[in-house]
Amino acid sequence: MDNIELRQIALAGGTILLALLGIIYIGARPKAGGKNPPGPRGLPILGNALQVPNQHLGAYFRSLLETYGGIVSLNLAGSRVILIGDIRLAKNVLEKRAVKYSARPKAYYINNYIDPEEVYWGFHNQTAAFHIARKLTTGVMSSVRAGVTEPLQHFESLRSIQLLLNDGGKDWLRHINGVPASTTLAAAFGIQYDAPELKEAINAVEELTKLSAPTASIINIFPFLDWIPGPMPWRTRARAYRKHENELYESLVREAVSGKNSGMNTWAAEFARDDKPEGNQSRFMNIFAATAKTAVALQSFILACVMHPEWTRKAQQQIDDIIGPDRLPSFADRPRLPFIEAAMRETMRWRPGVRFGLPHESTADDIIDYNGEQYFIPAGTTVFAVTWAIEHDPTKYADPDSFDPERFLDDKGQLRSNYETSSFGFGRRICPGIPFAERTLWIEMAMLLWTFNIRKAEGPSSETGLAFQYDDSDAGFTGNVTSAPRDFPAVFEPRSARHAEVVRREWEDCEKDLNILLPAAKG
Ligand code: HEM
């Protein structure tokens, strides 16, 4: 849903509403028993639509929450939006009242053309299909929790580390992005990191991301245009995408279930098994090609190493004390390396990849109590839990823009027990991929810190002739639904010749065959 342009959509939506219906806007009025949450004053008809920026929506939402408190109401040309900037309230609404707050707002182009069969179940409401897909995902994630994918995740991280060693970080973004992409697609479909299908699957997700943006098609704004018969551009593009996508995923699932990858314990094989009560559900596998959010977290981690290197010395000290210079970290070391865990939590807090979560939609009228006030939330309200505000609440996180993993550690250097985060969403729609994402992040961060000192590139850039200006403010990040650091150079220096030699040796000796890394269950 990148390139979101709420303002344009709301503006056009509001205008068309007026023109077609000729109604006089009466505003989103409070009902008996509760008032509207506070928010900026809007215009007649358009409400706040003209105030909403096209980019950096997360920053705008955060500034509103700082001005008005932990809950803000916006009226986008008649559509009601609630922003939440307080984790207690987010849990109270999206978790305790999940029955009312777990739908997704509908998008015309996605629902009617891009994904009419609702296989990308994260976009859609809680239908029977959604419950089946979610249950199966919880099932594969329980084997992830049990460690089934850890050998694969260890291998993929080691692969990226030796690539970084070989080029000193010249192509670091590609190597780092490759980790979540090939780990997820191997676990899901058994795709090898060098298989052509990997690139194809990533391209298909990129196209889906574009097509699912609210601005992807004029019919999101003017659905009545869809009455025009014939080969309109939105139909042609969606049809081409669907055809290519169906062929791609059918072949990925076929290879995983009965073809060359069928010797592996993949999620596709699990979804396709027809001896379970739900039968073969492999059509829900497409969603697992999305790996961007994990990649963004790794990019932000590299930015934190480059711009705020002070903390890396402490992390490396702990790694040296526990592991020493003769081997790389492995998952077995995780309980003894709380600093890495804290650095991972701080990365997710400091520059969350999804700055205002994914929208939930309420399905029944509700009244919520907050700070002594009662607020009325009508059915059909879009609710955003704004991570960018929640994770930067100065009453909870001192100096919230500084990168400081130690805020998650107690006096003895152990992890504090009260950890909670908004970065993965809430309630019935909370990210089901957390166990997999966390393992990918942890092992990659541990290996990077063991092997390298990661620093800024010095000297003038060959392209501009000027020193590169590093920037961790909003301007240094893309301002879409997924907020990633803009490209920046980084140098990956091995901490010693010994460290480099150990990486090369472990890479040479490690198991590389996915059939062995992900063995199919016997019997
Ligand atoms: C650092 C990495 C990740 C982040 C920050 C992240 C974040 C999120 C967020 C914020 C949501 C929306 C939650 C809500 O609506 O309340 C979500 C949904 C989802 N995520 Fe993740 N995610 C990550 C990695 C993954 C991975 C690795 C997978 C799968 C292997 C995954 C699968 C999903 C799915 C299927 C949904 C839709 C759930 C639903 O609608 O019920 N995510 N994620």
Image (cartoon, rainbow, N blue to C red):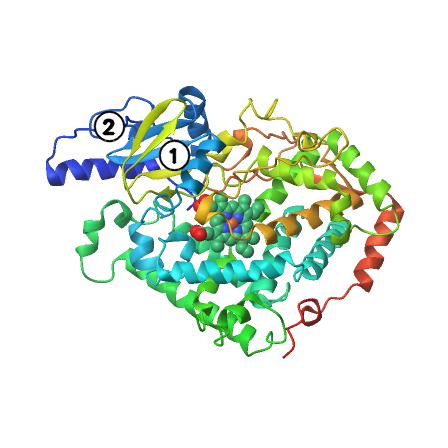
Looking at numbered disc 2 in the image, what kind of residue is underneath it? Pro
Where 106 sits versus 491, above or below? below
x then y, percent, for residue 293: 54, 47
Q: In which quarter of the image is residue 522?
A: bottom right
Residue 30 - label: 2
Residue 237 visible somewhere in the drawing? no
Marks 2 and 1: in contact by CB < 8 Å? no
Mark in front: 1 vs 2: 2
- Residue farthest left in this picture: 22
Instruction: Look at the image and tell me whether residue 473 can be seen.
Output: yes
Location of mark 1 (residue): 54
Which percent across, then down, holds residue 461?
67, 35
Give whichever of discs 1 and 2 has the lower sequence position: 2
Other-residue count near label 1 (Cα within 10 Å), few / some / many at <14 / 14–19 / ≥20: some
Tell me if 93 is positioned left or right of 331 in this view. left
Residue type highlighted by circle 1: Asn
Badge 2 element: loop
Instruction: Give the residue displayed 11% in from the left and 34% down from the top.
Output: 23
194, 359: nearer the viewer: 359
